[in-house]
Image: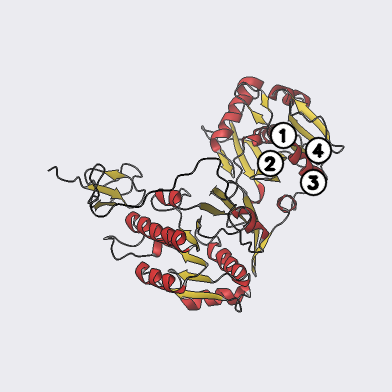
Amino acid sequence: MAKPQISYTCQSCGAQFPKWAGQCEGCGEWNTLVEEAPLSAGPGKALKGPKGRKLILTDLSAKEAPPPRHPSGMEELDRVLGGGLVPASAILVGGDPGIGKSTLLLQAAARFASTGLRTFYISGEEASAQVRLRAARLGLTDAPVQLATETSLRDIMTTLDAERPDLVIIDSVQTMWSDNVDSAPGSVSQVRATAQELTTFAKRRGAAVILVGHVTKEGQIAGPRVVEHMVDTVLYFEGERGHQFRILRSVKNRFGPADEIGVFEMTGGGLAEVTNPSALFLSERGTPAPGSVVFAGIEGTRPVLVEFQALVAPTPHSQPRRTVVGWDGGRLAMILAVLESRCGIPFAGLDVYLNVAGGLKVGEPAADLAVACALLSAREDTALPAECVVFGEISLSGALRPVGQTENRLKEATKLGFSSAIAPAGGKISGFGGMSLREMPDLTAVVGEVFGAG
């Protein structure tokens, strides 16, 4: 009989290795490999004991009612969840330390409890007195939320099976400890076992479970990636410490659209909803200045207008700096290469700084043209008109590609008082609501017609 193979799992990134080593080859961390015992029964081994039940098979044409929803009354949260909380669902919420995860979920717990859901808030990081102080500061003292502080998974599961809640919030999954797993709390094995137990409870009892997860320095939820596959919804709470704006972004949702966002503003009384994020992101925009361009973007299903700011200055260093905040640095390098190669606009010997105002992180390729216009505006010291918005994707040949939802972008721009737009040709909309639309075939046309450079 072959001896079962022992594996070593990195407690930082979850990578597995057949032999122990001092440094993990996956993430580079030291002394994080821990031995894990193999499964007692592997593939190909017959299961002993009574036979299992026969599965009920259906065809694809079978019709089922959509899952019920429990709206919280917080429109931004309900939007990200796809319309409300779904019973028997597991939700994972991640974010940087101190960004406001606990504040958001305590407010959400109070809202859900006020709608009749039996809500439990279990904290493994803070004492009950600390949670009550936060609730008092937020004005939630009278909310019918049941509070407990515990890290033992066995005690938590015993309580949940006896009390039968409708909603359980675990803050956080990295602090939970299962006594049948031989590793420290927060390790890969503990996080995986805890998430599996709580997700199974949600499916078995029909309760919704929200898990709070810590994030690594790379911005990913700490622990094994399999946890994100276990749960139904993965949400990231984003924001910059220096800005009051907070973005709740859905990166996975089995019951609604992915990549949807909800916008909140951090105030002294907690997180306030922002129903019109475009107006908020542009509220501090004054007289048009060189390097400032308004981008008409789409986040999830909603149009959002944000300001791109660029600064181009001679560099005193042999290697020019390329600094980006809120956008992909790789795409910035691509835009600079296209401007130099296809349009003859050099940026050698120039430092380039790019920033998305308001702390929003933009990942849409439609922002390419707005970035290019911001760079050209800063380099040529020419400001675009205050009433102009820009959007479009740039190919490596310098051609401009049409982007989706052009009508929604122009609707949002019109609503906020913008009267002109620069967009790729071929968008199938020649004008909208009296807006002047300048359609450009390629980046060379933008350089020549808009900036008179080249």
Q: In this rendering, is residue 375 above or below 6?
A: above
Q: Are the residues at dot 2 and dot 3 in contact (C-beta closer than 8 Å)?
A: no
Indicate the amino acid at tag 3.
Thr
The residue labelled by disc 3 is: 287
Residue that appears at 53% across and 40% down: 60
Of 429 and 245, nearer the camera is: 429
Q: On the rendered structure, is 186 left or right of 333?
A: left
Residue that appears at 57% across and 66% down: 103
The x and y percentages for residue 130 are 50, 75
Measured in 3D between alpha carbons, the distance from the residue under mark 4 to the one under mark 3, in whole angstroms, is 10 Å
Q: Nearer the viewer, mark 4 or mark 3?
A: 4
Q: Given the current orientation, which residue lies at the most extreme right position?
A: 434
Indicate the amino acid at tag 2.
Gly
First reached walking from the N terminus: tag 1 or tag 4: 1
Quadrant of image for the N terminus: top left
The residue labelled by disc 1 is: 377
Measured in 3D between alpha carbons, the distance from the residue under mark 2 to the one under mark 1, in whole angstroms, is 20 Å
Q: Which image quarter: residue 331?
A: top right
The residue labelled by disc 4 is: 385
Of 134 and 156, nearer the camera is: 156
Indicate the amino acid at tag 4.
Pro
The residue labelled by disc 2 is: 297
Q: Nearer the viewer, mark 1 or mark 4?
A: 4
